[in-house]
Structure formats: structure tokens, C-alpha cells
Image (cartoon, grey):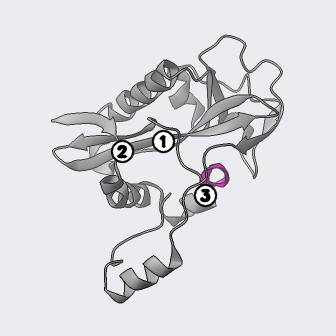
Amino acid sequence: MITIREETFRDVPAREALLDACFGPARFLKTGERLREGRMPADGLSLVIDRGGEVIGTVRLWHISAGLDCPALMLGPIAIDPACQSLGLGGKLMREALGRAADLGHRAVLLVGDAPYYQRFGFSTEKTAALWLPGPVERERFLALEFEAAYLEGANGLVTATGALAQKPDLAVLVAASAQGQLAGLRPAA
């Protein structure tokens, strides 16, 4: 049975392993990571595909500003277990994430990705021409989708992270847990 549900803290190791399998360590060097690092994803918009207790898909959306004072979301990364690709699960997860974002009242989503793939969901380069990201990006891969018509009209400038800051762990607690052998297998959050 395949279910799309909100991610929980118990999913973090499986999500990280899935992202490693799909993108490798180079994923931390991508420009989109600059908008995610040290931030929490948007509430209700961290989703996984669960197949019998196994995480086989993941997507997260993040609060950003598309230029000056233009709240939007940044989608990424989205990943499907390589053994399950070509089954339509990526499209299903994408439609679910976009539907939830629209239902929550968000007005636009940006992403960096393969234009031919994302065009089928309504993404295009039309609304990103006057925007730039905090690092290099191939312009033809910088895409946007509006839920509200003309919402990104006039949006220009640097895309910046605006989401809540991730809580930093208490060093004393980490040292104590490490001394007790409780940190084995944990990885940093994406």
C-alpha cells in the first residue's frame, strides 16, 4: 500500500538516505541548498511516500521571498527511490504537494529543475526572468508556477529564505548523548 503523508521526525534517516541515493553528496553544493540550510520547511509541506513503512519518496517546500516582499515557496528536493522510478510516483507526489500548497493559501512556487518535466505541472521560466538565486543556476532550469494569476508580475531581485530558523541542538545534550553512544547513525538534516 502506497500512502502520501506528512513527514515525521522518524522519517529523517530514511529521507536522508533516499536523497543520498538519488543525488549523492553534491546535493549540499546546489544553489537551492542555500535557501534551505538552517531553515525549517513550510508547515504541512514536507511529504513522503510511504510503502508499507518504507519511505520511497520525499518532497519539501520552503518559505522564500521572490525578490523584495513577494512571499512564495521553493520546492525541493523531490526524490523517488531509484527502484520505484518510472511508476508515476514523482508526478503523484508533485501534484499532492502543489495541491496542499494551494489549499494552504500560498500563491506561487519556484524551483530549479528539468523544464520539460515540470512544465506538465504548469511551471515555466516566464516569471523568473527578473529574479536571481544566491548562487549559480542555469536560467532555463529556474521555474515558477503561480496559483494566483499575475502574482509574480513585477517580482524582481534576489530570492531569499524567509522560513523559520531550525532549532540548533544543545551542545551539552549532544555531548552527553554521544558519551552514551546514542548518536550513532544520525545525519545532519537536509
- The stretch of residues the image draws in magenta is 31-38
Q: How many marks?
A: 3
Indicate the quadrant where residue 68 lies: top right
Tell me which numbered mark, 1 or 3, is placed earlier along the sequence. Answer: 3
Q: Quick check: can you spot residue 65? A: yes
Q: Nearer the viewer, mark 1 or mark 3?
A: 3
The residue nearer to you, when weighing 24 against 86, is: 24
As helix, strand or loop, the secondary structure at mark 2 comes to: loop
- The verdict on residue 79 being magenta is no
Tell me which numbered mark, 2 or 1, is placed earlier along the sequence. Answer: 2
Q: Is residue 69 above or below residue 167?
A: above
Q: Nearer the viewer, mark 2 or mark 1?
A: 2
Question: The residue under label 3 is which amino acid type?
Answer: Gly
**Residue picked out by circle 1:** 60
**Residue picked out by circle 2:** 7
Indicate the quadrant where residue 147 lies: top right
The residue nearer to you, when weighing 1 against 160, is: 160
Query: Where residue 31 appears, x then y in whole percent?
Result: 67, 52
Q: Is residue 103 above or below residue 20?
A: above
**Residue picked out by circle 3:** 38
The residue nearer to you, when weighing 8 against 144, is: 8
As helix, strand or loop, the secondary structure at mark 3 comes to: loop
Q: Quick check: can you spot residue 86? A: no
Question: The residue under label 2 is which amino acid type?
Answer: Glu
The crowd level at tag 2 (other Cα within 10 Å; few <14, some 14-19, many 20+) is: many
Q: Residue furthest bottom?
A: 179
> Residue shown at 42%/69% (left/top)?
187
Query: Where residue 66 appears, x then y in whole percent?
Result: 74, 33
> Residue shown at 44%/78% (left/top)?
174
